[in-house]
Each structure stands twice: as C-alpha cells, then as structure tokens.
Image: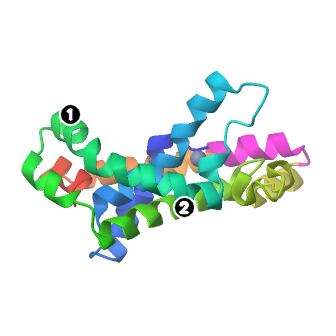
C-alpha cells in the first residue's frame, strides 16, 4: 500500500475536478479502508490477510461507508480541527451528513481501492466470492515481467514508485497551498 496518508492527493485532486464535492469526506474516504490493516495484523495474524473486508466492494460500501461517514462527522472535526488550529464551527458544518458528503466519502473509498488494486500483490476486491490471492496488481505483473523477477519483486518496485509519486504530489500540494494552508488542505 502507499503509506496510508499518501492516498490524500487523490482526495485533493478529485475535489479540484468537481468543486461541489466535500473535501473532508473525500479525505476520510481515501484513507479509511486501511484502518483494518493494524486490526487484521494484530488480531488475525496468520489467519487472515492484512487487507480484507474494507478492501472488498461489499465491505467497503456497507460497513466501510457507514463507519467512514461516522468518522467524518464525529472524529474528523475535533481531531483535525485541534491538530491544525482550524475553525471548528466551519469544519463541523462541512462535515454534516448530506448526500454530497456521502458521495464524497464513497468516491474517496473508490479511489483508495483503485490505487491498491493497481499494484497490491493480492486484492480482496471481490471477496468473499473470489480468492484475494488470485487478483494480482497489473503493475506487479508488469514490473516483474520487465525486470525478469517474481511478483514480489514487481510489487516492491511498484510500491516504491507509487509511494514516490504520491509523496511528491502531497509535498507539492502542501508547498503550493501557502495561503490559509491547513484550511484549504483539510476543509477545501
Ligand atoms: Zn489500502
């Protein structure tokens, strides 16, 4: 996976393409699926893969969407507002549950699943109907063929490449947003 916060540039980018969308909802949606990773690693090591329910379409758009909307409304405003010294009233108003917010969270989740699908060596996108290990990211296949190595090698190269691209995009966003930086980065 890209380090989870590195999914952020998709939230920012989507909010620029369609300015009606809600940036806060997009931000939570783009990072939310990875919340299951530490839980799966700590409690289900050697039993389940470290990406599963929230990285499947069925899980992402039922329990995932529901929980992500909850987090956007109740956890994002006090957490981000205090950390970055934002106007709490404005942030809370932005995070009210509306059809636009719901759509924004859902789009954020879609972007997360799409990025992961590109280069994860296994993908639970169609879990529980299709074995996650039978869906290999096309970038892993490409790099492993190109470099003459195995899928793991392809994954390592793709992972580094994606993280560099997303990390650079994030750095650019932070550097170039110099006026009311944190307001524009977290609320839009
Ligand atoms: Zn992920």
Image quadrant containing the C terminus: bottom left
Q: Identify residue for label 2.
A: 61
Alpha carbons under labels 1 and 2: distance apart: 29 Å
Q: Identify residue for label 1.
A: 83
The secondary element bearing badge 2 is classed as helix
Image quadrant containing the N terminus: top right
Camera-nearest label, 1 or 2: 2
Whether residue 11 sits left or right of residue 124 in the image: it is left
Residue at the spot 52% in from the left edge and 52% down from the top edge: 63
The secondary element bearing badge 1 is classed as helix
Residue 136 placed where, x, y %?
81, 54
Specify the segment rendered in magenta: 148-160
Mark 2 closeness class: few <14, some 14–19, many ≥20 residues within 10 Å? some
Whether residue 70 sits left or right of residue 186 in the image: it is right
In the image, residue 133 sits, relative to residue 19, either above or below, namely above
Q: Do the residues labelled 1 and 2 touch (CB within 8 Å)?
A: no
How many numbered tags mark residues here? 2
Residue at the spot 47% in from the left edge and 57% down from the top edge: 65
Q: Residue 168 carries which label?
A: none
Which comes before the other along the chain, label 1 or label 2? 2
Residue at the spot 47% in from the left edge and 47% down from the top edge: 32
Q: Give 140 or 19, whichever is nearer the viewer.
A: 19
Residue at the spot 77% in from the left edge and 60% down from the top edge: 138
Mark 1 closeness class: few <14, some 14–19, many ≥20 residues within 10 Å? few
Residue 10 placed where, x, y %?
44, 60
């Amino acid at each position: 996976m890209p380090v989870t916060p590195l999914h952020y540039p998709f939230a920012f980018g989507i909010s620029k393409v369609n300015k009606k969308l809600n940036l806060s909802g997009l931000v939570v949606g783009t990072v939310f699926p990875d919340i299951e990773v530490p839980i799966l690693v700590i409690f289900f090591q050697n039993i389940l893969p470290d990406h599963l329910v929230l990285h499947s379409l069925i899980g992402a758009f039922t329990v995932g969407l529901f929980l992500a909307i909850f987090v956007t409304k109740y956890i994002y405003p006090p957490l981000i507002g205090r950390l970055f010294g934002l106007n709490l009233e404005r942030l809370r108003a932005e995070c009210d549950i509306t059809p636009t917010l719901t759509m924004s969270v859902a789009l954020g989740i879609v972007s997360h699943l799409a990025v992961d699908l590109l280069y994860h060596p296994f993908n639970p996108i169609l879990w529980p109907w299709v074995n996650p290990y039978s869906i290999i990211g096309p970038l892993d296949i490409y790099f492993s063929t190109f470099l003459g190595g195995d899928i793991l090698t392809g994954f390592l190269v793709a992972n580094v490449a994606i993280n560099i691209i997303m990390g650079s995009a994030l750095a650019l966003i932070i550097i170039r947003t110099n006026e009311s930086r944190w307001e524009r980065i977290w609320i839009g």
